[in-house]
Image: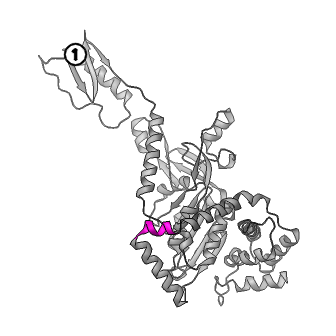
Amino acid sequence: MASVLGTASSILASRSLVSPSPKPAFPSISLNPGQGYGRKLYGGIGIQGRKGRPRFHFAVTNVATEVNQVEQAQKVAAKESQRPVYPFAAIVGQDEMKLCLLLNVIDPKIGGVMIMGDRGTGKSTTVRSLVDLLPEIKVVFGDPYNSDPEDPEAMGIEVREKVTKGEELAITMTKINMVDLPLGATEDRVCGTIDIEKALTEGVKAFEPGLLAKANRGILYVDEVNLLDDHLVDVLLDSAASGWNTVEREGISISHPARFILIGSGNPEEGELRPQLLDRFGMHAQVGTVRDAELRVKIVEERARFDKNPKEFRDSYKGEQEKLQQQIASARSNLSSVQIDQDLKVKISKVCAELNVDGLRGDIVSNRASKALAALKGRDKVTAEDIATVIPNCLRHRLRKDPLESIDSGLLVIEKFYEVFG
């Protein structure tokens, strides 16, 4: 009897080492005198007793390959079953908002866009419709941070160590990711936290990435951003300033890249943003309610068509969507060849200086946005007209607040532009 108990104990011990599951490896076992021990199944594994020596039969498979195949299948299934998105090309009016979004997709270093306007003006619909137009980028396969295989500054620590050792990276193409940041999200969910399952089952401290890791090299969208809790605003400020997210949790200190296009939307009647966060948005778009009766009727009819048959409605705009995708891809590839004359650069900085814009972020964003607009139009040189189009969106939210002037008007910027540019 003692030998039988010893054998069962060794079986349980061996099985517990193999399985990482926090649940017991086997159901409870009661050994009664006189019970036969010829052949029995425990947990689906065949155990045969022969001369008191148990044998295990394990089928070793390539778990990583199976997991990747399952993930790919899940992504395809999710894409087919997900809620249909309103086509970007079908949005009527709101040209300023659409242009700011497109310029940020062409050049993510512009720094995002803040969209403020009346309720019911299509802010959230327009931002989410951007998903279909997002181009593909190279990422390291299986990396939770969407690491760039060619840019060390956009690599996670593990990927960077592999590059240092000379290991070959598995590269794949994936669409730029758009991540929604809910107002009620916890700080752990945003920044990342301890992987409790691994801690309990394997006894190791493991990091579970959060929303900032998922948004790296993608888009982080915050609806009603002016209602965001202060502690989450501080997290966004830190990541937006450094491009990295540092997490200090339970003896773990980990940093990972968090470079994202920050897009926020909100209603100015519900409150204002902190100046520090407002300055982090590269551009500011003002959205107003459409006043033209015919346009309003068209918007209502288009929305009714979409609600009635989303697939048919999306198919009717497929050609325009593909044309816009090609235009964005071409602009991204030609962006590096776009030039801006020194004279125009000086005039941009003169406008910023005479408007008393704090810091140099306004100068940098104005230069980048004008080059992105030239690339979108298929040109390799910036004109004064390009600058006139984008400079109000780049500077209006950086001006010192005049109690008698709305921050969203941009009239002061336009007046100063024509004064400097003639």
Query: Which quadrant would the C terminus be assigned to in this image?
Result: bottom right
Query: Residue 80, located in which quarter of the rendered image?
Result: bottom left
Q: In this view of the protein, which residue sits in the foreground, 380 or 163?
A: 380
Q: Which residue is mark 1?
A: 4
Label 1 secondary element = helix
Task: Tell me: 201 left or right of 354.
Answer: left
Q: Position of residue 53 (x, y in %)?
A: 28, 12
Q: Main secondary structure of the magenta part?
A: helix
Q: Quadrant of residue 322?
A: bottom right
Q: At which x and y percent is residue 49? A: 24, 15
Residue type marked 1: Val
Residue placed farthest to the top in the image? 51
Q: Residue at x 41, y 73 (%)?
A: 307
Q: Which region of the structure is painted magenta?
A: 309-316
> In this orientation, does residue 100 appear?
yes
Residue 105 in percent (x, y) is at 64, 63
Residue found at the far left of this picture: 34
Which percent across, then down, holds residue 183?
Answer: 47, 67
Total numbered labels:
1
Q: Nearer the viewer, residue 153 or 44?
A: 44
Specify the quadrant that holds the N terminus.
top left
Q: Is residue 17 left or right of residue 397?
A: left
